[in-house]
Amino acid sequence: MPEPSKTNPIRETSDEARAQARGLIENAQFASIAVLEPDTGYPLVSRVAVAMEKDGSPFFLASDLSGHSKALKIDGRASILFGEPLQKGDPLAFPRVTVIGKVEKLSRDDAVHPARRAFWLNKHPKSELYVDFGDFAFYKMSVERVALNGGFGKAFEMSAADINEIEKS
């Protein structure tokens, strides 16, 4: 891949960039999800509490009554933006990652549901109040691609494989 230029800011993906992207997803408590409104086709952005599966797939808990859940039922295409700026400095100078893919609602009958629920409650203990409500379910994204902005001049395009669990040496 060529070096970044004024017309192409994308850098060659490095292990450091992969780790940064995965860390932004894995450590996030909340993220913004963008879906397509069924009636208008316009983007709808909402904030969701998030977690990450070992394979790098983001997942979240949502009510079937929410606008984003209703939209995902019709069209599972979505993107999720992770990365919160710190209190001081230019928010655009801080790293963020957008994960793009298709989201599906997960069944409570799934064999991994109890483990996913326990993991979720460990990360988001306040959701114990509603995690078992009938209109709430987990949703998981099948990642198709990843766009990391590691800060000014640090742009990377990645695949789902780039955010899979990195082998520990």
Image (cartoon, grey):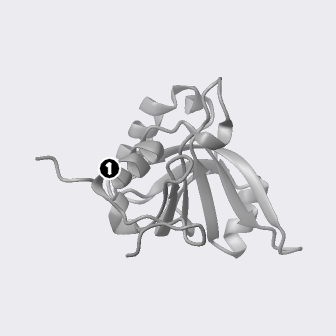
Asked if residue 17 lies left or right of residue 32, the reply is left
Compared to residue 73, the image places residue 51 above or below, namely above
Compared to residue 18, the image places residue 132 above or below, namely above
Disc 1 crowd, CA 10 A, few/some/many (<14, 14-19, 20+): few
Image spot of residue 62 (x, y percent): 64, 49
Which residue is painted at 63% across and 72% down in the image? 77
Compared to residue 167, the image places residue 90 above or below, namely above
**Residue pushed farthest front?**
6
Asked if residue 154 lies left or right of residue 48, the reply is left
Which residue is painted at 33% across and 58% down in the image? 55
Amino acid residing under circle 1? Glu
Image spot of residue 16 (x, y percent): 32, 50
Residue that label 1 marks: 16
Image spot of residue 102 (x, y percent): 56, 71
Secondary structure of residue under mark 1: helix
Asked if residue 126 lies left or right of residue 42, the reply is left
**Residue pushed farthest right?**
40
Q: Closest to the observer: 33 or 62? A: 33
Asked if residue 165 lies left or right of residue 116, the reply is left
State the count of labels: 1
**Residue pushed farthest left?**
169
Which residue is painted at 46% across and 44% down in the image? 24
Which residue is painted at 67% across and 35% down in the image? 90
Q: Quadrant of the N terminus?
A: bottom left
Image spot of residue 128 (x, y percent): 55, 30
